[in-house]
Image (cartoon, grey):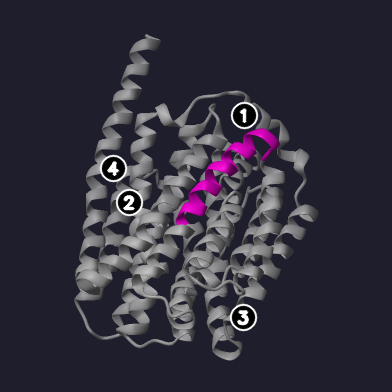
Amino acid sequence: MRFFQMYLNSFRGLSREIWFLALVTFINRAGTMVVPFLSIYLKTSQHFSYEEIGWIMSAFGVGSMLGAWIGGKLTGKIGFYKVMYGSLFLSGVFFILLQYVHGLVPICLAVFFLMLVADTFRPASYVAINAYSSEENKTRSISLLRLAINLGFSFGPALGGMIIYRAGYSSLFWLDGITCILAGILFLFLLNERSGKQEEQVVIQKSDSPYRDYPYLLLMFIVFLVGFTFLQYFSTIPLYYKEVHLLSENQIGMLMFMNGFLIFLVEMPLIKFIEARQFSIYSILIISLVILSLSFVVLNLFSSSGILIVGMLFMTFGEMFNFPFVNSISLKRAKGKNTGDYMALFTMAFSLAHILGHNSGMQLVKTIGYYWTWYIMGGILLLCIALIFWYKNLTQHEEHELEKNDN
């Protein structure tokens, strides 16, 4: 009962618009059921090789990266509202059409344009958080949207696995497209463009390039490396589940469901607990990197399929300790500057991870096998710990210089 009360309290004080934005995001993400099964679909239904799947997933990442850049620019010019509902409607159409595309080059192009349209949504959504939430509620607002995303990703893969098992991949593409379009319709009905306009205009009028902000560029490199490893859970890891541990799509979907459902239960109270006790954000990030590294390493330590649950638990808790706080640091760094460009770069760092992560993972699996690939991923995450210390020193030096100038 006490946990339940604490859980409810962690949601108090968030704006009505943030709740509506979370609802739309949940429906949209629950609909993107194809993504966790894309590598399996390309291998089993389209009969592509590992190398070819790697190139298709790179096209996925290039489209995502360019879409994020365009989304940031469009957000500055026409506002987050138009960018977000346009992205929802158009990506729905592209999801439906994707099932009719065959051949390596056509699928690469189709996936590229799908992600170009879909990921204009992401930088615009960060600007929407800025416009619809107060400063003290920003990290929890980000967590609520992450909760909606992960709850969507919980139900999506679980439902997607059942749909594939019973009706095949074609039904999945149709459902993906329809739910994206439904999310766009709800967005228009539930969210008022004018309620966030004033803050959005204030942010956009102040210009400062993130490409000259060297501590921020280092932070984005860390985001890229974490994304590079994390995204293996959406490409090489599902194949590992299927080929090494012989899991069905339905079982893989349930593992993904466990990830999102745990985030739904734990992340908001966890964030509120951490904020209330004012733990060092750098300590939290270092803990997250150790846990994420363990999520790969443990896969090599035991042959039983039960270790897959342990690996997923490590990944889930590492994600909860990492992503909301990195997002929050990025938004705070962007304060008083061009938020659209800053958050576009944040999204582009993750998109670059899509470009290189999926492809590199596939090539590594093909060349050296799953065993050494997991150790490489764990090692990259441990390298990020040293980079966090570097970022901390840079920002502290920056703060000291500002204090000197003020005095």
- Closer mark to the observer between disc 4 and disc 1: 1
**Mark 3, secondary structure of its residue:** helix
Residue density around tag 4, few if under 14, some if 14–19, many if 20 or more, within 10 Å: some
Q: Which residue is mark 4?
A: 388
Image vertical order of residue 283 relative to residue 309, above or below = above
Amino acid type shown at disc 1? Ile
State the residue position of label 1: 204
**For the residue carrying disc 3, how many other residues have a C-alpha within 10 Å: few (<14), some (14-19), or many (20+)?**
some
Mostly what secondary structure, the magenta segment?
helix
Q: Nearer the viewer, residue 343 or 235?
A: 235
Query: Which-is-in-front pick, marks 2 and 4?
Result: 2
Q: Is residue 77 left or right of residue 46?
A: right
Residue 170's tag is 3
Place of residue 217 in the rendered image (x, y in percent of width and height, measured from the top left): 37, 36
Circle nearer the N terminus (1, 2):
1
Residue at the spot of label 2? 225
Read off the magenta span: 61-79
Amino acid under label 2?
A: Leu
Q: Is residue 392 above or below residue 352?
A: above
Q: How many marks?
A: 4
